[in-house]
Amino acid sequence: MAAFLYRVGRLAFRRRWYVALVWAAVLAAVGLGSLKAPGAVDEEFSMPGIESQKAFDLMEQRFPGATADGATARVVFIAPGGEKVTAAGNRKSIEKAVAGLGDGTQVASAVDPFRARTVSEDGTTAFATVTYKVGANDLTDASRSHLERTIDRARDSGLTVEAGGTALAAEGGPGGAAEVIGVAIAAVVLLITFGSLAAAGLPLLTAVVGVGVSMATILALSSALGLSTTTGTLAMMLGLAVGIDYALFVVSRYREERAGGRTPQEATALAVGTAGSAVVFAGLTVVIALAGLAVVGIPMLTKMGLAAAGAVVVGVLIALTLVPALLGFWPNGVLSRRARRSGRIESTGDNAGARWARFVLRRPIPVLLLGVAGLGALALPAADLQLGMPGDEAKPVSTTERRAYDALAEGFGPGSNGPLTIVVDAKGTADPKSAADRVAKEIGGTEGVVSVSPARFNDAGDTAVFSAVPSTAPTDEKTKDLVTTIRDERPGIESGTGASYEVTGTTALNIDISEKVQDALIPYLVVVVGLAIVLLLVVFRSLLVPLKAALGFLLSVLASLGAVVVVFQQGHGAELLGVEQTGPIMSLMPIFLVGIVFGLAMDYEVFLVSRMREAYVHGESPAQAVTSGFRHSARVVVAAALIMIAVFAGFIGESDSMIKMIGFGLASAVLFDAFVVRMAIVPAVLALLGAKAWWLPKWLDRVLPRVDVEGEALTRPEREPAPEPAPDLEPART
């Protein structure tokens, strides 16, 4: 591996113009393809195998032309103080507004609250439900604008009007501001780390090129492969992250080799052969984690994972080819200002990383106990983790969605914000209407159900749909228990009526998603961590180092989950982050944490420990190897981690609570993994294990392939070039 990558780096340096032109041509080609390709289709969210999805599928089959999970808007009308919505003037204004709401071209129906009996008992509040023919992602700007204008006109009549539901939900996640802030912070960190504008700019430039190629490719293939507009979100975030990291690793090693007296060309080749090997295997661990998302069983998540894996592969290829090519253009530009001025490049001596390693080597047990105890204490709240999908109740009170949620809860009870949809399949029964009525009566009598709506039948008259309003809020554990109870009653009701039914709706769907994700988490961990352990066995040729890496990762992920629970579920310190309403943790949060943080954690693990392995293979004692690894890699790993923390922490400033949660969780996980696990627990464990850390059973040593990640083949006497008395700081010539 190292010898092959050495030749790749040397060739890229010598043929730098060709390499640069090839990447420019690739970027131009995929960019042109993305412009000419059909637009991405907003794929409807689906999760095969859950009851809510089966009900949606049945509704679309039995109600032709209707979209089971079409966008909805719940427009809430509140009478002025002391008045009632039933007063003649207020009623006329509401009816006029409902008529206007139903005029949109994408509107399927707008239900008058006075006909649907959706007026509160005290007469102060009423709501109209607007249903659309398409999903929220397919709503046009014209439809959204029409909804907003109609609401504004209703407000002019003196009524307080608020709107919730999916129709007004903002599309996508955070915009480009977070990425721009992240790149700016990355530039500052790189500049401080390297002391050179060129050294700081090169990783940013190559990362941007890699992200550009990846995103243009995704856009070009979106229509052909059925990729949605959200597929590239994860690819952009991780592509930028690993692109900076991988280029950073290669440039850092290049500077070390130049300090050792190598010519620019030889230093580039050795950097790609050694650091490039670590990049390849670090990239493979990330790809494994992302491709493993297919285990969860959510098609959209699978596509997101595969697209992001492709972006990581592009990042690896960029680091192995374009980075050495650019080093060929500016061989001295990436050196520090002192080196360029003095004409001398100082070798890496006793730095903060080496001093910290010696500190841990002298006190391994206290450092290990403190690190494990600290992360363990942070992980304890994760035992109370409650998964769900926060809705409008988690939005700031400045939004109309949150105000509509609060008004509905006050006027109609908390359950009105999350009614359950019951789909009755009465096909084959003698009297479908009677069967559906009996099902509705039985469910309406269930403890915890406040009311049921009249059943709506399809044209064939064999399928009915009605709503059941719970007495508790959508995210309340009692609502989850109610859904389970209604489903458990199904055998008895079906035997008495001859009709079957399914429970769905946003509330039931969120419950089903949470349960499925929770069930998939352990298999996902087994697959991802298991494959990564096998890969790290090949890289480090050690049995204990991969196990230690996996256990440390699990500890950091559990600690970050615990921190998320403390803030976003229990509410401690929530106000400091601008979180106005606590509740369940987003269902996909554990999967995102495991997938994304596992990849980044293994990046740091491979780069840090591979330098220790390299030093050990080249004859240093186990303790000396740990110190050497930290001397050469600690600063780079710290810089890479700070960049990732800054990028993720930028999302905490977003108004959406789920985006806040993702940013906080990822930033916390990287902080714990990089600074506690990799910087403290790893050297402490290696200090206690000594030479046993690199032990491998002989039979396993014979079975595992040899890939020479530590570059042993590159340091043999026949390849070792004669060191130069003073490195040439003139531009390289070939």
Image: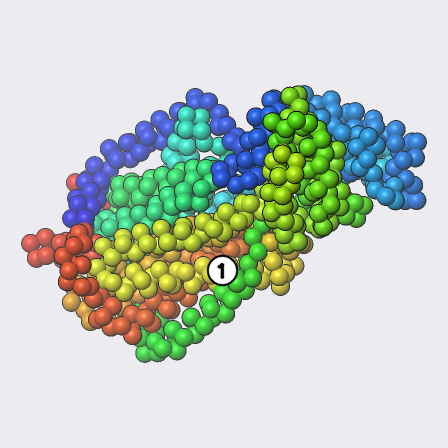
Dot 1: what SS?
helix
Name the image quarter holding the C terminus.
Answer: top left
| Kind of residue indicated by mark 1 | Ser
Q: Is residue 64 above or below residue 386?
A: above
Give the percent coordinates (x, y) of residue 697: 18, 64
Please tell me which residue is depicted at 74% across the width and 36% down the height of the picture: 453
Q: Nearer the viewer, residue 440 or 180?
A: 440
Q: Is residue 162 visible?
A: yes
**Display colour scheme:** rainbow
In the figure, residue 36 lies in which quadrant? top left
Q: Is residue 669 left or right of residue 406?
A: left
Give the percent coordinates (x, y) of residue 219: 44, 30
Q: Is residue 119 left or right of residue 691?
A: right
Q: Count the numbered circles shown.
A: 1
Please tell me which residue is depicted at 34% across the width and 61% down the height of the picture: 549
Give the percent coordinates (x, y) of residue 299: 45, 37
Q: Is residue 235 above or below residue 684?
A: above
Task: Say which residue label 1 marks.
Answer: 560
In the figure, residue 545 lies in which quadrant? bottom left
In the figure, residue 435 lies in which quadrant? top right
Q: Nearer the viewer, residue 23 or 544?
A: 544
